[in-house]
Image (spheres, rainbow, N blue to C red):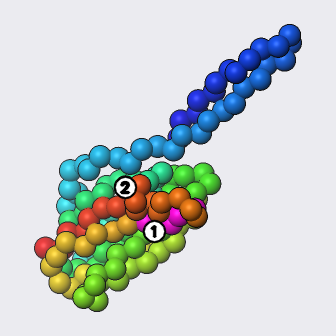
C-alpha cells in the first residue's frame, strides 16, 4: 500500500491535512512457475496473496500428483481467499486466508486443463478482489 499525505492548510501553529491510503495495483502476469515433483511425489509452492494479486499467478503442475500450496497473505487488514471452481466438477478448492496469516492446502488435480483461481472477497458495494485483478491460472498438464 502507498500512503499519500496532503497538507491542506496551515493556520498559525495548527496544520490540517489528510492521509489517503491507496491499495496496490494488481500485479502484471509473471512468467509461469512449473512446480517440480519432490522425492515424496508432492508438488509444492508458496503463493503470496497481496492487495489484489497472487504471486506467482500462473502455476503449472502435473495431473495425478498431489499439489501442496502454502498461501501467505501479506496484507495487514484485508482477508483474502483462494478459489478454484471448475464448472465440470473436476477440481474444486476453496480456502480463506486471514490478513497476515499462512494456510497450507493440498489437492490432487486429476485432469489436464486450465483452471482459473481467484479471490471473491469484497467490501459491499465495491467490486470483488477478482474484479480488481486478483486472479491467476493453475495449468494442469
Q: Are marks 2 and 1 in contact (CB under 8 Å)?
A: no
Residue 60 relative to residue 135: left or right? left
Residue at horizontal 42 percent and vertical 44 percent from the top: 25
Check the image and name the residue furthest to the front: 125
Residue at horizontal 77 percent and vertical 14 percent from the top: 10
Which residue is label 1 attached to?
120
Q: Which residues are magenta?
A: 119-123
Q: Which mark is residue 54?
A: none
Q: Which mark is residue 133?
A: 2
Residue 93 relative to residue 60: left or right? right
Residue 109: which quarter of the image?
bottom left
Callout 2: few (<14), some (14-19), or many (20+) C-alpha neighbours within 10 Å? Answer: some
Residue at horizontal 23 percent and vertical 57 percent from the top: 33
Q: State whether residue 17 is above or below residue 53.
A: above
Which residue is nearer to you in this view: 104 or 137?
Answer: 137
State the image coordinates of residue 68 (x, y, percent, origin top left): 35, 72
Check the image and name the residue furthest to the right: 13
Q: State whether residue 132 is above or below residue 68.
A: above
Mark 2 or 1, nearer chain start: 1
Task: Give the CA separation, mark 2 to mark 1.
Answer: 11 Å
State the image coordinates of residue 104 (x, y, percent, origin top left): 45, 71
Res. 85 in view: yes
Helix, strand or loop at label 1? It is loop
Residue 8: which quarter of the image?
top right
Whether 121 is among the magenta residues is yes
- Name the image quarter holding the C terminus: bottom left
State the image coordinates of residue 44 (x, y, percent, origin top left): 31, 67
Whether 7 is among the magenta residues is no
Which residue is nearer to you in this view: 111 or 1?
Answer: 1
Helix, strand or loop at label 2? It is loop
Amino acid at each position: 500500500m502507498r500512503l499519500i499525505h496532503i497538507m491542506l492548510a496551515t493556520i498559525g501553529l495548527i496544520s490540517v491535512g489528510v492521509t489517503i491510503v491507496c491499495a496496490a495495483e494488481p500485479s502484471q502476469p509473471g512468467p509461469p512457475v512449473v512446480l517440480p515433483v519432490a522425492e515424496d511425489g508432492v508438488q509444492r509452492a508458496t503463493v503470496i496473496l497481496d492487495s489484489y494479486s497472487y504471486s506467482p499467478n500462473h502455476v503449472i503442475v502435473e495431473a495425478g500428483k498431489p499439489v501442496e500450496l502454502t498461501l501467505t497473505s501479506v496484507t495487514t487488514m484485508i482477508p483474502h481467499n483462494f478459489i478454484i471452481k471448475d464448472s465440470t466438477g473436476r477440481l474444486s478448492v476453496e480456502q480463506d486466508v486471514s490478513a497476515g496469516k499462512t494456510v497450507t492446502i493440498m489437492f490432487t488435480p486429476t485432469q489436464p486443463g486450465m483452471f482459473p483461481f481467484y479471490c471473491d472477497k469484497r467490501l459491499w458495494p465495491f467490486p470483488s478482489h477478482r474484479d480488481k485483478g486478483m486472479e491467476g491460472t493453475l495449468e494442469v498438464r
